[in-house]
Image: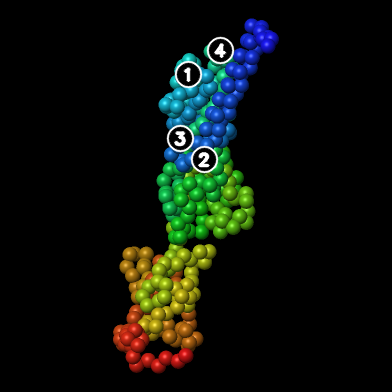
Amino acid sequence: MKITKISRKYGQLLLGAAVSFAMTAAWAVICTLASAQGQQSPANPQSSPAKYVLGPGDEISIRGVGIDELDSKDSKPYTVDVSGDINMPLLGKVKAAGLTVEQLEAQLTRELKVYVRDPHIAVTVVEYRSQPVSVLGSVNTPGVVFLTGPNTLEQVLSKAGGLRNDAGNEIYITRKTDAGKIPLVSAKADPSGQFTTAKVEVKNLLEAKDPLENIIIKPTDVISVPKADLVYVMGSVRKPGGFVLNEKQDITVLQALSLAEGLERTSAPKRARIIRHQPDGSRIEIAVNLSKVLDGKSQDVPLVGSDILFIPNSSSKVIAYRTIEAAIQAGTGIAVFR
């Protein structure tokens, strides 16, 4: 068998091709890992939106194939300091604030070419901390949330756990004047001229009646969701509790009773009363004969925010119904027809 010797030059070409293939494969693995990390829980590094603008406080992960200082699984994330810089191996201080993730990747790639022949850099945001927004009022988790890119009003409310059941009918947005005007018809400057405020109707937002109201929220915006006015129906009703007035400013006794799904069998509607709080902190009680109102013999009575409609029990009826229920449970004294 004739053995053909490969020339040294040809062998070098094959070696170079193999190295190039290995580098490409390794880079593909890095990208796959970065993508997988983005689909994990918020506690893990997230896939960074390429257009997210970095700022002080953000923590980023920087990986580079074939660069020992950037190719370790144990490497810690880099924090953008108050000056907007990160401290990189080989490069020292690098300005990151004001750059998008995509731009920082491109900049690091250019600067590392001095030390690495063909650097491949992947940047992911581990913790978003530079673009805070305050969400206050009737949301499930009020406090500070952080933007992760161009986030809409609905997205920010979602980050705050969504609206509570007692949320009012309007959402208020406050923005610093130097951040630009709020793009809503209702926007107006406050007396100091330092802020712009605007409001969005909750119903319009949730029903997507006007998509333009779902505006992009900017860093340092304040979103306030006031608590709604409630009326309370308590006592001997099927569904006692508080009921939001929604768009209405008032509601009648019969409407409130309907929301509470009607009277219990043991109720005493003739002795119902409204408890109403006064501006001075005192309260008054207004007697209401619900029997006459239900029969149309008396006018329906309007309720206002914070009113309590109380329907007491009838003790005599309680005894009667308890006797009947006991008889049914015992199986005696009650006729059963099939």
Numbered disc total: 4
| Dot 4 crowding, Cα within 10 Å, few <14, some 14–19, many 20+ | few
At label 3, the amino acid type is Glu
For this rendering, which residue is in front, 333 or 208? 333
Q: Amino acid at mark 1?
A: Asp
Label 3: element kind:
strand
**Kind of element beneath mark 2:** loop
Name the residue type under label 4: Val
Estimate how packed mark 3 is, as few (under 14), some (14 to 19) or many (20 or more) residues with alpha carbons within 10 Å. Answer: many
Which residue is under mark 2?
A: 39
Q: Label 2 vs label 3: CA separation?
A: 14 Å
Q: Decide which of tag 4 and tag 1 comes sooner along the chain.
A: 1
Q: Position of residue 89 (x, y in %)?
A: 46, 18
- Tell me whether circle 3 and circle 4 mark residues in contact (CB < 8 Å): no
Identify the element where label 1 is drawn: helix
Query: Which comes before the other along the chain, label 4 or label 2?
Result: 2
At a point 52% along the width and 40% down the height, the residue shown is 39
Q: Position of residue 93 (x, y in %)?
A: 47, 18
User: Would residue 45 be found to the left or right of residue 234 on screen?
Assistant: right
What is the secondary structure assignment of the residue under circle 4?
loop
Work out whether mark 2 precedes mark 1 in sequence or the reverse, and give the earlier one.
2
Q: Residue under circle 1?
A: 68
Percent position of residue 317, x then y: 34, 86
The CA distance from mark 2 to mark 1 is 26 Å
Indicate which disc, 2 or 3, sits on the residue closer to the N terminus. 2
Quarter holding residue 15: top right
Identify residue for label 3.
127
In x, y percent, where is residue 174? 50, 45
The answer for how far apart the CA atoms under marks 4 and 2 are is 34 Å
The residue indicated by pointer 4 is: 114
Left-right relation of 314 to 174: left
Task: Say whether residue 317 is left or right of residue 293.
Answer: left
